[in-house]
Amino acid sequence: MSNILPTTVAPETFALHGSYDPLRSEGSVKPPLFATSTFVAGSAGELARWFRQAYGLDSGHPGQPDGLIYSRLVNPNLQICEERWAKFERAAQAALFASGMAAISTTLLTFCRPGDQILYSAPVYGGTDYLMTHLLPSFGIGTHAFLVTDGPVQVGELLRKALAAGPVRVVYVETPANPTLALADLRGIAAECASLDPRPIVVVDSTVLGPVFHRPLELGAQVVVHSATKSIGGHSDLIAGIVAGSNELVSTIKASRTILGTMADPHTAWLLLRSLEAYKVRVEAAEQKALKVARFLRAHPAVEKLYFPGFTEDAVQMARFDSQCEGHGSLMSFTVRGGRAEAYRVLDALAVVKLAVSLGGTESLAEHPRTHTHSDVTDADLDRFGVCEGMIRLSVGLEDADDVIADLKQALGRIG
Ligand SMILES: Cc1ncc(COP(=O)(O)O)c(C=O)c1O
């Protein structure tokens, strides 16, 4: 039996067999959990050589040592998972983190120093908003928001304004945006960045759609980040993050990860290996159910507006969907007629759909962005971003779609 997998296999095939030789682990079909903090070396000299490679003491570039040293640097479960995920993303390399926020903050701290500037799209996930508006500025890093709906001309104008304050190192884009699901013009933004010297690194948070439906690296981004807590983990039983991109950029981010200690632990990586096996099947199935739910919500009289990629009358947004996305995903928001009281009444009446934050799990979840996930964003900003009082965010899971629809119907019946 040969354990050499052709490099041409599809990501979902690689997710089952790639980067792992069962015969090196007692024939175990599944990669075992390497629950160890440290690894034995054959000799003191060999261990010294690995350290020199890991820290780049000879080459000047921290890199992958020939052997395993310590699980903060690398662990087989992380390594297998990272190589399998890189295939989905069609990236040279990936890096696993303890959370989505660990992936985002480590990436930004890798490339930005006091005096540097970051442009970011808005709205973004509430934690990322806090990082941009409070934490990074407290380290002397300037941050400047543009609306995710803005076109490249407006982003270009803001880029030039930010440049007056210092070099723009990163343009950070969350697309589709959480919770409005609005899409950025990624190609246009990347083209604006490519015209600058030094060229800002375009970092995209692709948590909402993921690589089956949306591949930012093919649209001009250099780095993709995900909260792997969401559809990548997919079972709402772990917290993790992933970064993907070129060997050069991801190796640099990994070198910071080693020192900041923001890597995922082996058990999380092992759970993610389970998750990756059915990743494509899960997200495609959830999308089909979400489409049915979206059609129901769009037609319901108590629903004022539906926010779901590809379900829009806005011609600019529709053009961005058609040219950048290969699917709708399973996250949507909708506004109910009325305001917060009506939204709460619907949320409190749900039974099949659970009232909880997070998204991308096997179960359907709903929440009120304005007072839950995005409660740390100012009211003025929430108004500007269109996150209104009547908005409910819904992540559709793998329940029977008709059960989810019946649940939404009875809950919406409380207000209209
Ligand atoms: C779009 C997006 N990015 C990042 C994060 C942060 O991820 P984590 O909770 O895994 O740190 C979230 C969490 O909800 C998110 O929705």
Image (tube, rainbow, N blue to C red):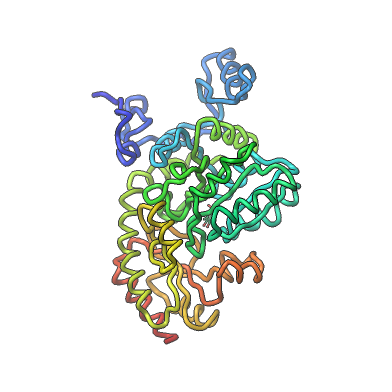
Judged left or right of residue 33, residue 63 is right
Up/down of 75 relative to 391, above or below = above
Residue at image point 30% right, 51% down: 281
Q: Quadrant of residue 90?
A: top left
State the image quarter where residue 168 is shown: top right
Residue 46 in percent (x, y) is at 55, 14
Residue 14 occupies which quadrant of the picture? top left
Q: Is residue 314 left or right of residue 6?
A: right
Quarter that holds the C terminus: bottom left
Q: Looking at the image, how many numbered discs can be counted on the residues? A: 0
Residue 299: image location, x then y, percent: 35, 77
The image shows residue 98 at horizontal and vertical percentages of 55, 45
Residue 319 vertical position relative to residue 381 in the rendered view, above or below: above
User: Does residue 11 appear left or right of residue 78 in this picture?
Assistant: left
Is 396 above or below relative to 212? below
Q: Position of residue 158 (x, y in %)?
A: 65, 53
Residue drawn 50% across the image and 50% down it: 186
Which quadrant, please, contains the N terminus?
A: top left
Query: Residue at image x 39%, y 37%?
Result: 87
Give the residue furthest to the left: 1
Horizontal side of residue 7 vs 70, given as left or right: left
